[in-house]
């Protein structure tokens, strides 16, 4: 399935928690743990997005002709 670049926006990195957002109390749902989970998903999504763009020959926002 080929996707036009305008229909396949680049994934956005998650916002990093601020310095005071983690209380360092060992919370079950620590903001840092959630951030690192989101960051891992972002990196996977970004790699998949880059692979799709490479497959359809898109570089720097411009389509390139395939031989």
Image: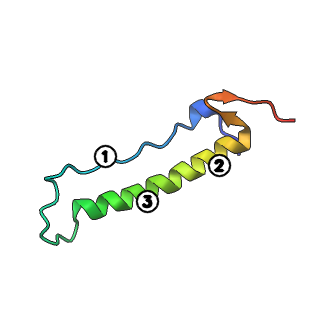
- Write the residue at 61% across / 29% down: 61
- 62 left or right of 65 in image: left
Q: Is residue 18 above or below residue 34?
A: above
Looking at marks 2 and 3 on the same chain, the residue that comes earlier in the sequence is marked by: 3
Q: Residue furthest right?
A: 67
Residue wearing tag 3:
40
- 63 left or right of 19 in image: right
**How many numbered marks have been drawn onto this rendered protein structure?**
3
Q: Residue furthest front?
A: 19
**Is 3 or 44 nearer to us in this picture?**
44
Residue 31 screen position, x and y as percent: 23, 59
Looking at marks 2 and 1 on the same chain, the residue that comes earlier in the sequence is marked by: 1
The kind of secondary structure element at disc 1 is: loop
How far is the residue under mark 2 from the one under mark 1?
A: 24 Å
The kind of secondary structure element at disc 2 is: helix
Evaluate if marks 2 and 1 touch, with contact meaning CB atoms under 8 Å apart.
Answer: no
Count neighbours of disc 3 (C-alpha within 10 A) and say few if under 14, some if 14 to 19, many if 20 or more.
Answer: some
How far is the residue under mark 2 from the one under mark 3?
A: 17 Å
- 45 left or right of 14 in image: right
How far is the residue under mark 1 from the one under mark 3?
A: 13 Å
Evaluate if marks 1 and 3 touch, with contact meaning CB atoms under 8 Å apart.
Answer: no
- Quarter containing the C terminus: top right
Count neighbours of disc 1 (C-alpha within 10 A) and say few if under 14, some if 14 to 19, many if 20 or more.
Answer: few
- 51 left or right of 38 in image: right
Count neighbours of disc 2 (C-alpha within 10 A) and say few if under 14, some if 14 to 19, many if 20 or more.
Answer: few
Looking at marks 1 and 3 on the same chain, the residue that comes earlier in the sequence is marked by: 1
Residue wearing tag 2:
51
Residue 19 screen position, x and y as percent: 17, 52
The kind of secondary structure element at disc 3 is: helix
Residue wearing tag 1:
15
- Write the residue at 16% across / 72% down: 26
Residue 11 screen position, x and y as percent: 48, 43
């Amino acid at each position: 399935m080929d996707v036009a670049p305008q229909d396949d926006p680049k994934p956005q990195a998650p916002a990093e928690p601020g310095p005071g957002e983690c209380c360092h109390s060992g919370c079950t749902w620590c903001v840092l743990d959630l951030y690192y989970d989101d960051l891992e998903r972002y990196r996977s999504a970004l790699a998949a997005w880059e692979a799709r763009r490479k497959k359809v020959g898109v570089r720097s926002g411009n389509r390139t002709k395939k031989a």
